[in-house]
Image (cartoon, rainbow, N blue to C red):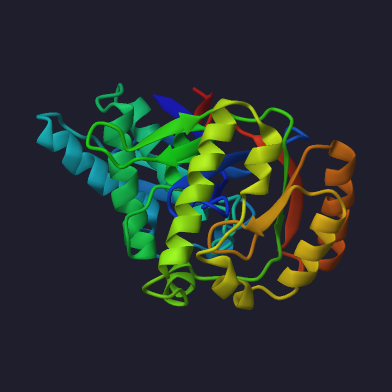
Amino acid sequence: MYLKVYAPASVGNVSLGFDMLGAALLPIDGSYLGDEIEIQDSESYALDYAGRFQHVLPSDISDNIVTHCYMHFSECLKSRGLTPRPVHMTLHKHLPIGSGLGSSASSIVAALFGLNTFFDSPFNKNDLLKMMGVMEGQISGSVHYDNVAPSYLGGLTLISELEHEVARKLPSIDTWYWVACYSGVHVSTSAARKILPQEVSLQTTIQFGRQLAIFVDALHRQDAHTAQTVIQDVIAEPYRKSLLPRFDDAKAFALENGAGAFGISGSGPTVFALCDDLSQAKIINDWLAQHYIQNDAGFSHICQLDLEGSRIVKE
């Protein structure tokens, strides 16, 4: 048996929803922005690397998160009275590590979604999301779902972390364009978490809750304007932007040239601009490509939401 799956890149937090909102991205030019994994039967477990960013992966496959996913999935199979079998996996690493685009989440989602499909889907979506959260916690130091959930489910997701429902998809605004620009600079998720204060003020807490409530309500009412007006990060951006060279200039340009919102994708350094108009998105995309990208590893894409999430691309 042979299977190839894909899991899209994602924007964590979406500025106003720290650890509670995530969005899956799909470039409008039809290209994939995410990791792929091939799985086939084998006499023993094996993992190969391919893709643009394979050089940043650990040389010892036992240190790779995909191997950890296979081991964890196998233990979960045994807990259900099922027997795992060895597989040969190939990780096509298309996302840079430490980019703020859910790179680890993309690999985790592709691995676990692929393995579940390969073994005739013994686990439901909620089961898989919990596994994905555990694996993400191995990378970042804490369990959070704002990248794995959109990468797996697609679209814009709200993290509920209920026992019966880890996350749910929210209504999307079809007219939005998401300009996502990766500068090429590496930002550690754990380091970006350490820079944040351990406590926030009562005023900030109230503002955070108000914005998130208004945003979710506006999505259900398809009120794009109101939804955009509350996409402001009062928790992380004031601190994390110090890790992102040229962030203030990029935000100023985007907002002055038609973006309805601008923020940090996850822990950064990727930034995103939200636009209603494609011509505005192109102007901002071109400027970010020229002024925010700092080395050959960087890239910028105009995207819309990837509503499908993880999927089979070949079998």
**In which quadrant is the N terminus drawn?**
top left
x%, y% of residue 255? 80, 56
Q: Quadrant of residue 183?
A: bottom right
Q: Position of residue 175 (x, y in %)?
A: 74, 30
**Point 39% across, 63% down: residue:** 140
Residue 272 position (above or below residue 291): above
Q: Is residue 178 left or right of residue 84?
A: right
Q: Is residue 126 left or right of residue 193?
A: left
Work out whether 271 lies above or below 66: below
**153 left or right, relative to 179:** left
Height in image: 266 above or below 109? below
Residue 257 x, y percent position in the rendering: 87, 53
Q: Position of residue 36 (x, y in %)?
A: 53, 40
Q: Is residue 106 visible?
A: no
**Is any part of residue 121 visible from this angle?**
yes
The residue sitting at 43% across, 53% down in the picture is: 19
Compared to 63, does 146 lie above or below?
above
Image position of 66 (left or right of 7): left
- Residue for point 36% across, 48% down: 46
Determine which quarter of the picture holds residue 303.
top right
Near-viewer residue (246 or 200): 200
| Point 68% across, 34% down: residue | 224
Q: Nearer the viewer, residue 43 or 219?
A: 219
Q: Quadrant of residue 238?
A: bottom right
